[in-house]
Amino acid sequence: EETTERNYYTRYHNMSEVTAWMEQMKRENPDVVSSMVYGQTYERRDITLLKIGLSSTGRKKAIWMDCGIHAREWIAPAFCQYFVREILRTYKTDTKVNEMMKNLDFYITPVLNVDGYIYSWHNESTRLWRKSRSPGTGGCTCYGTDLNRNFYANWGMVGVSTDCCSQTYCGTKALSESEARAVTDMLGKMREDILAFLTIHSYGQLILVPYGHPNISAPNYDELMEVGLGAAKAIKAVHGMDYTVGTSPDILYANSGSSRDFARLIGIPLSFTFELRDKGEHGFELPEDQIQPTCEEAYAGAHHIITYAHDKVF
Ligand code: PAY
Ligand code: ZN
């Protein structure tokens, strides 16, 4: 088959390849993989997630993972693909993964910002596009809103720009962007079921916990830090890479309107942002020979968090 060729997971893939891969995952694993279109982008493309789990009767607890909310962070969609492949490869033989596949459904969006991702593949001059692709309003001629500043979570308060030409433009209002509305609607329906929310970015080698606003802290901050530090330890054990754990104001920069903060605010207890490799040498243009080691270690980190979330309930 085209996509399972040996080197598939060591390369970056454009949107049509990712879409074909989603179809293949369903075709090859019809009992455990289904897909759902849960929204549309500004340019009217489908936003699709894969739902992965062993079927059982009744309502299941869930894990959320999205990748590619920022277009230029190509390692993120690559990680979502790797993560899906890895749980599908191991769930029949790995007792823990098997148990989690029975008790949980994984809702995985390989590319959230589809318009932006396609634009970042368009040519070399657009490679570092970050935002959505909606046009500015009120006479502003720049394109795009930062989707990770557009959620209803202290929207517009800190670490954002109201200049539509800025990389961190927060939009005209919370949820001005259809991509942020799509995620918000899904989380609204599922929030009591979601045990853990993981949103995957690059770069910086960080595990960020709520909140981005410096003056508020999560009621379970200690738990979030402990689980995050456990994930960083699991990551380091794979290839020796250091990941720093903390809130954005503590270890990166303050910000508001992120999906991670929104998830925690609506009651999802475990909500994390992963910033994958590297620490700036290549930045968003992480060489393909680092895809596999980056995904291997990040898988260990995600596995730690998901196992913790699972074992708390089951
Ligand atoms: O607190 O959730 C947060 C911040 C997460 C990211 C953000 O939305 O600004 C951090 C940046 C990202 O991945 O988009 C980091 C990268 C290196 C950037 O573009 O500044
Ligand atoms: Zn990002």
Image: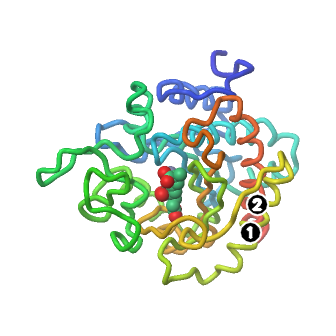
Q: Secondary structure at mark 2?
A: helix
Query: Callout 2: few (<14), some (14-19), or many (20+) C-alpha neighbours within 10 Å?
Result: many
**Which residue is the extreme one toward the front?**
281
The spot of residue 77 in percent (x, y) is 57, 39
In the image, 58: left or right of 96? left
Mark drawn on residue 161: none
Which amino acid lies under the numbered mark 1 shown in the image of this protein?
Val
* Residue at 12% over, 54% down: 138
Looking at the rendering, in which quadrant would you find the C terminus?
A: bottom right
Residue at image mark 2: 231
The spot of residue 230 in percent (x, y) is 79, 65
Residues marked 2 and 1 touching at CB (< 8 Å): yes
Which amino acid lies under the numbered mark 2 shown in the image of this protein?
Ala
Report which quarter residue 2 is drawn in. top right
Report which quarter residue 154 is drawn in. bottom left
Work out whether residue 37 or residue 296 is closer to the camera in this orientation and state it. Answer: 296
In the image, 216: left or right of 241? left
Residue 190 visible somewhere in the drawing:
no
Question: From the viewer's perspective, is residue 235 above or below residue 195?
Answer: above
Report which quarter residue 220 is drawn in. bottom right
* Residue at 33% over, 69% down: 156
Question: From the viewer's perspective, is residue 261 above or below residue 69?
Answer: below
Question: From the viewer's perspective, is residue 8 above or below residue 272?
Answer: above
Residue at image mark 1: 227
Residue 195 visible somewhere in the drawing:
yes
Looking at the rendering, in which quadrant would you find the N terminus?
A: top right
* Residue at 33% over, 60% down: 170
* Residue at 45% over, 63% down: 258
